[in-house]
Image (cartoon, rainbow, N blue to C red):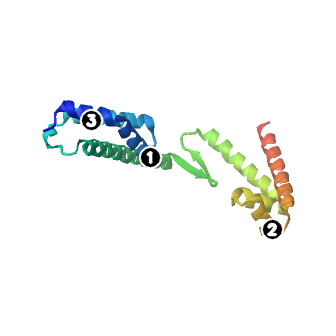
Amino acid sequence: MMSIEELNAIYLAQRANLCRFVAARLRDEAGAEDVVQDVWMRIEKSKKLEEIENPVGYLFTIAGHLALDIIRQRKRQKAREEKWTDETTTKLDGIATSQEQNAEASLLQAERIIKVRTAIARLPPKSRRAFELHRMQEMSHKEVAAEMGIAVSTVEKHIIRAMRELVQTLRDDVS
């Protein structure tokens, strides 16, 4: 039969190992410290001390279960936050906007999006194509060059030109 004092001594000897074990699962050292403290709280409340055959294994099992509970809790919280974000966010011309914004802010944002899209449409065809491939389809300069059949340096010039014109459009919008 194991006494609480014996289990306490084993707990103290294994505390650092328990912290590392839990931190590896949670990827959170502060959270691991909390879990290891909770392990002790569980031991203090346990009425089955006489049934423990492998005290180290018992400690690590409790720590693993508590860590798993936290991981599950985090997943549920993340799912709730994503659901809330989905419910409170609308897409305006492909751009996410919060429903919490006032109507004037949403209108200003929509107008800015329209201005940027208009400015993109006004770009010279090669500059527009290079910009769209690079910024919107997330292709590298090298990939854009291969797609358009031009040199990488030419792609860079087209993108720089497009960016300058878009920046100017946004500056004009602000002033």
Residue tagged 2: 148
Instruction: State which quadrant residue 63 falls in.
Output: top left
The amino acid pointed to by label 1 is: Lys
Q: Quadrant of the C terminus?
A: top right
Q: Quadrant of the N terminus?
A: top left
Q: Position of residue 154 (x, y in %)?
A: 87, 60
Q: Position of residue 61 (x, y in %)?
A: 28, 46
Mark toward the viewer: 2 or 3? 3
Q: Position of residue 119 (x, y in %)?
A: 79, 52
The amino acid pointed to by label 3 is: Ile
Residue tagged 3: 10
Mark 2 vs 3, N-terminal side: 3
- Helix, strand or loop under label 2: helix
Residue 60 vs residue 111: left or right? left
The amino acid pointed to by label 2 is: Met
Cα–Cα span, label 1 and label 3: 36 Å
Residue tagged 1: 78
Cα–Cα span, label 2 and label 3: 68 Å
Against 107, residue 37 (above or below) is above
* Rendered residue at 31%/32% (across/down): 12
Residue 32 vs residue 9: left or right? right
* Rendered residue at 30%/44% (across/down): 60
Against 54, residue 157 (above or below) is below
> Foreground residue, 93 or 103?
93
> Foreground residue, 2 or 128?
2
- Helix, strand or loop under label 3: helix
Q: Position of residue 21 (x, y in %)?
A: 38, 43
Mark 1 vs 2, N-terminal side: 1
* Rendered residue at 80%/48% (across/down): 166
